[in-house]
Image (spheres, rainbow, N blue to C red):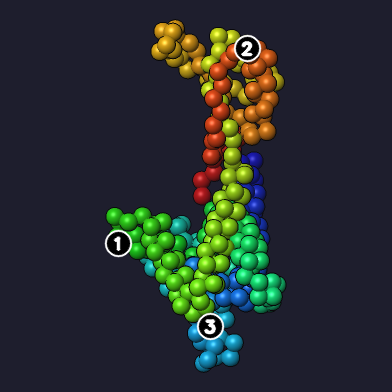
Amino acid sequence: MQKLINKRSIVIDYLMMIVGTGLLAAAIQCLYDPIGLVTGGFTGLAIVIKAVTERFVPGGIPLWLTNIGLNVPLFFLTLKFKGKRFIWRTVVGTVLLSAWIYVIPAIDLTQQDYFLAAIFGGVIGGAGMGLILLARSTTGGTELLAVLIQHFIRHYSVVQIMQVLDAMIVLTGLYLFGIKAAMYAIVAIFVTTKVSDGLMEGFKYSKSAFIITDQYEKVAKKILLELDRGATGLYAKGMYSGDEKCMLYCVVSKKQIVELKDIVASVDPDAFVIVSDVREVLGEGFLEYHKN
């Protein structure tokens, strides 16, 4: 039974990778490339190379070919330093992205409208990137290069190195396509980040509540019966009153937080409730932990 669940999880991961890389490729081919928005990464660098080589090669070197050509050497280096387990899904993600870029025709959907290209490219590309990350994969590029560089320069983080690499690519786009395209590329990067983060957090986002009440046993019982959620009692001391109290700690889904507050108010209107965001919850009643 567990093997069947694991196989199903792998199938879902690969389906998300297929859809995610398709959306990302559509944003690159139909929104970014036609208008010269260089948003970083190897695909952004591919747009630069295509523009530079247009004077030598009719139409320039295709994006899909550049993306594969830049990533293949990194695959072998990463295989050497990080091993097969680390690289496999990245190889699949990169091949899928390049295949989608090859298949999807380069159509200017926004008719040279920078604002629409930045917004819709960010939304579509961000949704694609979110699905790829949820599938525990990447599309190679500057992220893979940053991992390799960090292997030798350990006092910098992967994120810091990535930011420098992507900034260099965006600056190259500024030189080729001008300040207007570069500024809208930054807008597209911002939207992409927000959408991909929102998509990932939307699946895992929860709420936690600290509840301070003298009726803690009744509140905990109602939470269990009406919400099917457990609560943990944490013994605390009020520094003003000097009284020892039992403070309840409970984690619920976003849609249950309103019900939780209603339950507390129905038992003890004077209860003190602190609600905060929880980025991710693993365990019974929430997400199961799966090893890669």
Secondary element under disc 2, as helix, strand or loop, is: loop
- How dense is the environment of label 3, judged by Cα within 10 Å: few (below 14), some, or many (20 and up)? many
Q: Residue at x 60, y 54 (%)?
A: 195
Where disc 3 sits, the SS reads helix
Query: Could you say which disc has been placed on residue 83 in the image?
Result: none
Q: Residue furthest front?
A: 180
Mark 2, Cα crowd under 10 Å, few <14 / some 14-19 / many 20+, is: some
Quadrant in the rendering for residue 226: top right
Q: Position of residue 153 (x, y in %)?
A: 29, 60
Question: Does the rendering let one see residue 213?
Answer: yes
- Residue type at mark 1: give it: Phe
Q: CA distance from mark 3 to mark 2?
A: 67 Å
Q: Quadrant of residue 290?
A: top right
Q: Position of residue 182 (x, y in %)?
A: 51, 70
**Of 241 and 245, the residue lying toward us:** 241
242 w.r.t. 175: above or below: above
Q: Residue at x 58, y 45 (%)?
A: 201
Residue 286 falls in image quadrant: top right
Within 10 angstroms of label 1, few (less than 14), some, or many (20 or more) residues? few
Q: Pointers 1 and 3 in contact (CB under 8 A)?
A: no
**Image location (x, y in percent) of residue 289:** 54, 40
Residue plotted at (66% across, 72% down): 113
Q: Which mark is residue 152?
A: 1
Q: Are marks 1 and 2 in contact (CB under 8 Å)?
A: no
Sequence-wise, the earlier of marks 1 and 3 is: 3
Front-lying residue, 173 or 102: 173
Q: Amino acid at mark 2?
A: Asp
Q: Report the disc number at residue 268.
A: 2
Callout 1: SS: helix
Q: Which residue is mark 3?
A: 51
Q: Position of residue 151 (x, y in %)?
A: 33, 60
